[in-house]
C-alpha cells in the first residue's frame, strides 16, 4: 500500500493506493494538481496522464478511489452517483479501475464544488 493525501480548499484527507499496476503508475507521477468535477457523490479530476486500465469494473463501494480510463481521471466515490439504485452504492458512468481507498472518516466532501482545486501527493 502507498499512502497519499488529498487537499481541496481547506479540506485535507488521507487515502492509500493498492498494489495494482495502475496505482503504481499514479503514485509514481505524484504530486498532481487539477480542477475538480462533481457527479453525485463522486469527485473526479483529470490526472494529465494515462495509466493501465486492466481489470476495470462497475462494482464499487463508497470510499473507493478509481481510475476512469475514458477521462484519464482519478475518481473519489463517497456515496451514490446519478446511476446508483442503492442508497450507499456508487455506480460509475463507465468502468473504472479500483486503485485505492480514502480514509473512512472523511467528512466535508459534499461541500466540494465544480472547479475547486485539488492536490494529490505522497505522504
Image: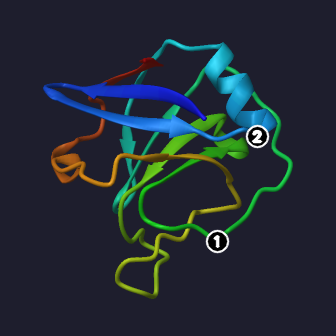
Is the residue 39 above or below the residue 26 in the image? below
Using the image, determine if residue 79 lies above or below residue 43: below
Q: Residue at x 64, y 13 (%)?
A: 29
Q: Which of 11 and 49 is in front in this view?
A: 11
| Quadrant of the image containing the C terminus | top left
Occupied quadrant, residue 5: top left
Q: Which of marks 1 and 2 is nearer the N terminus?
A: 2
Residue lying at 56% horizontally and 14% vertically, measured from the top left: 30
Mark 1 to mark 2 CA distance (whole Å): 16 Å
Q: Name the residue under label 2.
A: 20
Find residue 31 and report its horizontal and vertical position in percent.
50, 12
In x, y percent, where is residue 54? Answer: 86, 48
Which circle marks residue 59 in the picture? Answer: 1
Looking at the picture, does residue 26 appear above or below residue 102?
A: above
Q: What element carries label 2?
A: loop
Task: Residue 113: give its label.
Answer: none
- Where, quadrant-wise, is the N terminus in this rendering? top right
Q: What element carries label 1?
A: loop
Amino acid at each position: 500500500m502507498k499512502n497519499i493525501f488529498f487537499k481541496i480548499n481547506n479540506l485535507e484527507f488521507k487515502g492509500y493506493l493498492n498494489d495494482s499496476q495502475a496505482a503504481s503508475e499514479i503514485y509514481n507521477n505524484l504530486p498532481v494538481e487539477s480542477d475538480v468535477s462533481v457527479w453525485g457523490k463522486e469527485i473526479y479530476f483529470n490526472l494529465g496522464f494515462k495509466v493501465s486500465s486492466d481489470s476495470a469494473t462497475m462494482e464499487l463501494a463508497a470510499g473507493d478511489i478509481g481510475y476512469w480510463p475514458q477521462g484519464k481521471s482519478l475518481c473519489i466515490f463517497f456515496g451514490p452517483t446519478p446511476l446508483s439504485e442503492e442508497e450507499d452504492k456508487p455506480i460509475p458512468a463507465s468502468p473504472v479501475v479500483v486503485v485505492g481507498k480514502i480514509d473512512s472518516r472523511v467528512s466535508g466532501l459534499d461541500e466540494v464544488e465544480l472547479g475547486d482545486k485539488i492536490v494529490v501527493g505522497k505522504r
